[in-house]
Amino acid sequence: MALKSSNLTATNTYEVEVEVDGKTFMEAVAKVFKKQAKKLAVPGFRKGKAPRAIIEKMYGEDVFYDDAMQDCYPEALDEACEAAGLKVITVTGLEATHVAKEGFTFKATVVVEPEIEIKDYDGIEVEKLSTEVTEEMIDEEIDRVRERNSRMITVEDRAAENGDTVVIDFEGFCDGEAFEGGKAEEYNLELGSGNFIPGFEEQIVGHNTGDEFDIDVKFPEEYQAENLKGKDAVFKIKLHEIKTKELPEVDDDFVKDVSEKDTVAEYRDELKEQIAKRLESESERDLDDKLTNAIIEKVEGEIPEQMYDREAQNMVREMDMRLRQQGMDFDTYMKYTGMDANAVLEMYKPEAQRRVKMRLALEKIAELEKIEPTEEEINAEYDKMAQAYNMEADKVKEIIPVDSIKEDLGVQLAMKHIKDNAVIK
């Protein structure tokens, strides 16, 4: 197999001419004969027993050529594109131009990765989020824990207030007639939650347990029930119970209940450490995001749409794998959400574009800065993957080629280069 020519025909598009030698072609023909001979009926022979020469005489010398060429195309094209230094994204055309026993020649139209430019990637100025832990943050965290450990108690010595949960009977009337869906008994409603139409919850505030009263409301114009849109209504209310949330006191007993610590001071110190780690993690993610946006803005070059499509498809496959781990497949997910495959692809397109641009940028920076991972870094990456997949490192090396590992590490090291050279405020 040999590359005959490689010509740029349009932006990021090449026409590659490839020659497959006679020995390779005839070996492919022989393999096709073994697979297909048993399907061909030849008078005087049982199926699968007719000699190849008889079959070729009966059906034509080229009877197995098309299938043999199909078998040869992928490897031949891969070798030719590698020889031409082309990173192929997709093949858009394939045509045999000459076929004989001595071999065949074909032309392929391929879309390749673009050659991009990127400048001024060193010294990018970014602001890093503060990681300072304040006393207010600790108090807020303690309040959240208190909320999770709260209990509801009945209030009997005061009227209902916003934030209380009331137990009520209600029935609604429009033009003096009760309407469907407007009645309930012993309904629990949190005042101030906004779960009911405007004016409903507000008019319960100030009433006491045992009160029976009417409230006047107006249904919104955009209300879902057609017969109630914009209508005035009266609700008859009976207030059975007022409940409020009781939060535990912050003392040593509370601390022992919710943590492994013994005192409030120790618990606050522990929370401070936890919040600091969370803020640092959030700050690093935000910093990476800002640097990524800045780098993407500096990418110059025409990127083929097929690269975005391919990345979006990869993201859909990742999504499918995650769904399967949760006991659901992609088709079932689409059925539940009412989406189709095209809608999901479009949903992922913006992030796919971002990923593609960033990857190309980092690969270019690695090239410009002559960044190459060391043997030690490559082996460490294999070890990490072996641990993740619960496999022997040698087995991982058989599955994942070293060039792929080098590319991925080069991208990671290029990102580290950007970060190390950024002006972080």
Image: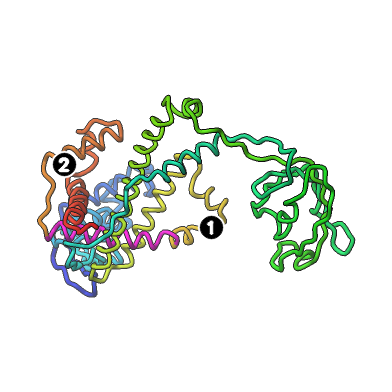
Judging depth in this view, the residue of 48 and 357 nearest the camera is 357
**Amino acid at circle 2:** Ile
> Main SS type for the magenta part?
helix
Q: Which residue is mark 1?
A: 339
Image-based side of 45 in relation to 65, left or right: right
Q: Can you see residue 321?
A: no
- Residue 93, above or below 39: below
Q: Is residue 176 magenta?
A: no
State the quadrant of the C terminus. bottom left
Which is in the foreground here, disc 2 or disc 1? Answer: 2
Q: CA distance from mark 2 to mark 1?
A: 41 Å
Image-based side of 75 in relation to 140, left or right: left
**Amino acid at circle 1:** Met
User: Residue 384's x, y, as percent?
Assistant: 24, 36
Q: Tell me the element at label 1.
A: loop
Residue at horizontal 17 percent and vertical 48 percent from the top: 406
User: Residue 58's x, y, as percent?
Assistant: 32, 56
User: Residue 129's x, y, as percent?
Assistant: 32, 54
Image-based side of 218 in relation to 279, left or right: right
Please provide the residue range marked out in magenta: 347-368
Residue at horizontal 43 percent and vertical 31 percent from the top: 264
Q: Can you see residue 301?
A: yes
Identify the image quadrant of residue 122.
Answer: bottom left
Q: Residues within 10 Å of mark 1 (few under 14, many from 20)?
A: few
